[in-house]
Amino acid sequence: MLLTTIWFERKAAARVQMRIGPYYASKRLGGYLQLVADAVKFIFSEIIIPEAVNPTLFALAPVLVVAMSFLPLSVIPVSVIPPSGSIFSIYFHEFYDPNIGMGVLTGLFTQYNMLLILAIESFYPALVILMAWSTNNRFAIVGAVRESYLSVSYDVLLLMSTIAMALEYHTLDLAKIVQSGVPGLIANPIAAVTFFIAMIIGSARFPFDIAEADTELVLGPATEYSGLLFVLTMAGSYVGNFVLALVFTDMFLMGWYPLSGLPGALLTVIKASLLVFFSVFLRSVYGRYRLDQALRGSWKYVFPLALFSLFLGLVVGYLWIP
C-alpha cells in the first residue's frame, strides 16, 4: 500500500507537469518496480550517525515515530463479523460489540475507539519533535517548531469534528456510526470538511508539508537521516495519512456498509485508499502554504466551521437518535 501510494503520487505529479515519471524499471507496469528498487537502495545504504548526537536516541526516534503512526490501526474497525458464514466468524464472540449486536473486525476491540484514536494521534507530533531534536540540526529544529505550531491547529480541528459526530450519533464507537446506515457526509458535511482539512495538515501533505519544506529546510525533522532510518521517517507520514483516511471512511463514508466480513474490509480499504490517492494528488495542483498562511487559514476560516459543525452535531443529535 505504501509503495502504491508513492508510485501514484509520482505518476500523478508527472502527468500534471507533462512528464512521464517512473518508467524505465518495469515499463510494462508503468515503472511500479522503480519504487521497489528505491526501497532496496535505501535499505542497503549506509546509516550515517552525526558525531554530536546521542546514537541511541538518534536511531530510536524514527522507530518510535513509525510505530506510533501504525498503532491506531489496531483499534480502527474495518468490518463487522457475522455469527456465521464468514472466515472471521470464529472471532464473533471475542470481538462482540453490544452497540451493534455483531462482532467487529479489528485488532483490539474497544467501544471507545474514536477517543483512543485521538489520544494516540496526539502523541505523534511530539515524537516528530523528539526526532528533530535528537539530530541536533538547525533545519530539523526549525521543522520541529513548525510542526508544533501546526499540531496545535489540526489537533483542535480533529477533536471538534470527532466530538460533533459523537454527539450526533450518540456514541464513541466507529462501528455503530457505520452500522447506523446514515453516512456522516450527509449527516454533518461541515464536520467532514473540517476533518479532511485537518487530515491533510496532520499528515503533512501538500499544500501543508510546511515542516518538511525541501526548498527551505532540506527535509525538516528528517534532514540528518539516511538509509533505513530515512525510510522509516518517510513511512510515518504516509501511514498517518492512511490511518486518518480509514477514520474518515468509517465516520463519513459508511465504511464497509452494507457488507460484512472480508468483502466489507476490502470495501473499507478501497474507500480509504481512494481518499489517500486524492490527498497525495494535491501535490500536483497546489503550491505550499507559508506557516503564517496555514495558521491563519486554520484559525480564521476552518475553526469557525468546526464550531458550526459542533453546534450542528449537538442540534441533530438532540432531534435524531440513530
Image: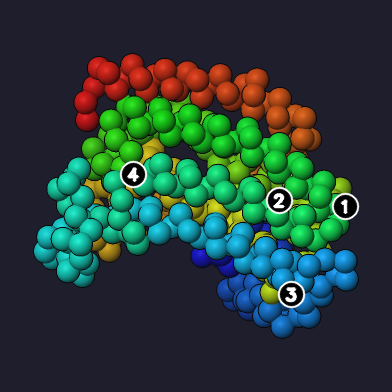
Residue at x-position 67% and y-position 63%: 61
Give the colouring mode of the picture: rainbow
Q: Nearer the viewer, mark 2 or mark 3?
A: 2
Q: CA–CA distance between discs 1 and 3?
A: 21 Å
Residue at x-position 57% and y-position 49%: 123
Horizontal side of 294 relative to 203 (left or right) equals right
Q: Tell me if residue 6 comes above or below residue 193 in the rendering.
A: below
Q: Residues within 10 Å of mark 1 (few under 14, many from 20)?
A: some
Badge 4 marks a residue whose secondary structure is loop
Tell me, yes or no, whether the two marked residues, 1 and 3, touch with CB atoms within 8 Å: no
Where is residue 304 shown, x and y percent of the image?
Answer: 56, 19
In the picture, the disc for residue 39 is none
Which is more N-terminal, label 4 or label 2? Answer: 4
Which is more N-terminal, label 1 or label 4? Answer: 4
Residue where numbered disc 4 is placed: 112
Which is more N-terminal, label 3 or label 1? Answer: 1
Q: Quadrant of residue 300?
A: top right
Where is residue 267 shown, x and y percent of the image?
Answer: 34, 55
Residue where numbered disc 2 is placed: 129
Numbered label tally = 4
Q: Quadrant of residue 186?
A: top left
Q: CA–CA distance between discs 2 and 3?
A: 20 Å
Q: Amino acid at mark 1?
A: Arg
Residue at x-position 33% and y-position 38%: 172
Where is residue 30 shown, x and y percent of the image?
Answer: 61, 70
Q: Tell me if residue 297 comes above or below residue 203 in the rendering.
A: above
Residue 193 can be seen in this image: no
Which is more N-terminal, label 2 or label 1? Answer: 2
Q: Nearer the viewer, mark 1 or mark 3?
A: 1
Tell me, yes or no, whether the two marked residues, 4 and 1, touch with CB atoms within 8 Å: no
